[in-house]
Amino acid sequence: MSIALVTGAGGLIGSEAVSFLVDQGLDVVGIDNDMRAYFFGAEASTSWRLDELKARHRRFRHVALDIRDFGALENLFAEIGSDLWLVVHAAAQPSHDWAAREPFTDFGVNATGTLNVLEAMRRHAPHASLVFTSTNKVYGDTPNSLPLVERETRWEIDERHQFFARGIDETMSVDQTTHSLFGASKLSADLMVQEYGRYFGMNTACFRGGCLTGGSHSGTELHGFLAYLMKCTVTGRPYTIFGYGGKQVRDNIHANDLVAAIWAYANAPKPARVYNMGGGRFANCSMLEAIEVCEQISGRKLEVSYSDANRRGDHIWWISDMTRFTTDFPDFNLTYDIEATLHDIYEAGRRRWVA
Ligand SMILES: NC(=O)c1ccc[n+]([C@@H]2O[C@H](COP(=O)([O-])OP(=O)(O)OC[C@H]3O[C@@H](n4cnc5c(N)ncnc54)[C@H](O)[C@@H]3O)[C@@H](O)[C@H]2O)c1
């Protein structure tokens, strides 16, 4: 039981997980077919990150298979067999807007791909644990019906509401709401991950992320909000804000903090867990507030334009309540606030972007 398998190994979360797990003394097998370049074009390719990982870590092995290919996936699980200790399942089509362009592709990667991973694991390594990077989009646009108030730089929830102090918890309904096709394919996967935990007793967990980010993010217009914002600020590329006057609020969790949470779960796993995971009250910002920090850090002015139309299903205000997770894992702490995260994105990105 000394091997970890990471899907989406070149991506933001996958690549941070690979480095972290190798440093913990595990051999790591990373699946990635660079489908991100297919989704968003060459600028979003994650091949640079895979090259870095291969150069840096002797105990990392890259396998360029497609998680939609069950036969290839099952062969890999069969080869690793009972040595498998942990699966971090982070491969995905991650954008709302893109999902509507190719619904079959989106569902194939997000939903069927997840079922493939679960079933290959059940057949060949049922005692391993699995963390699935789910999303707060499983709640659809229900958060937009919360009582929100407009402030100078952001939307906020009414102070009298139960979610004001700590954010939105897992009791929010996933029904009767517009998810976007992406949200629906991720929710299908999320339910399967829970079901393999409940029905088969496997140690599976859904980490329902707010915005996940960090210096390793290959940010692009359709995905990776803070990384793309900083990239535009540094390179002089114009940035368009879609809807809500730029006052929409997101919480942001740095990939290092998320990977630390995955590690905590892997060392004391339980079946069928569901956790909201985000920066919470500790690390959240509106677009306008994030732009101000990007400009301060980079010393450059961002060229911003506004579109009145918001993205369909987009949240006006989202802050995650992580109390369920911190109750189960009391030693866990968030370490990156918004400024620290944007500094990391700036330092990691500026040479790459200019090149
Ligand atoms: N980044 C966020 O803000 C955010 C928020 C909530 C949830 N999530 C979820 O977290 C996970 C990781 O997100 P990320 O930001 O690291 O994404 P990412 O796009 O940076 O990484 C995903 C990786 O998966 C690979 N991939 C895609 N389809 C594949 C396939 N069919 N076979 C093999 N590899 C494939 C891509 O090439 C990419 O390298 C995703 O499941 C995403 O839905 C992300």
Image (cartoon, helix red, strand yellow):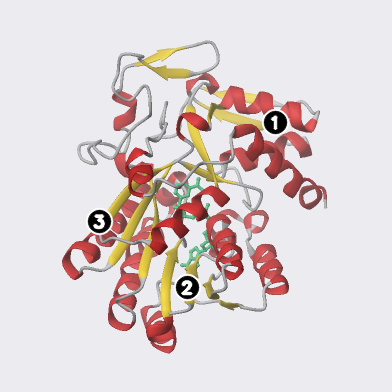
Q: Residue at x 73, y 41 (%)?
A: 346
Q: Give the x, y percent position of residue 351.
A: 81, 50
Q: Which residue is mark 2?
A: 5
Q: Which residue is mark 1?
A: 294
Work out whether 99 lies above or below 267.
above
Q: Amino acid at mark 3?
A: Leu
Outermost front residue: 331
Element type where label 2 sits in the image:
strand
Q: Amino acid at mark 1?
A: Cys
Asked whether, in this view, residue 103 is left or right of residue 39, the answer is left
Q: Does the CB distance between marks 3 and 2 fall below 8 Å?
A: no
Work out whether 287 lies above or below 101.
above
Q: Which residue is mark 3?
A: 191
Q: Amino acid at mark 2?
A: Leu
Q: CA distance from mark 1 to mark 2?
A: 35 Å
Q: Residue at x 31, y 36 (%)?
A: 169
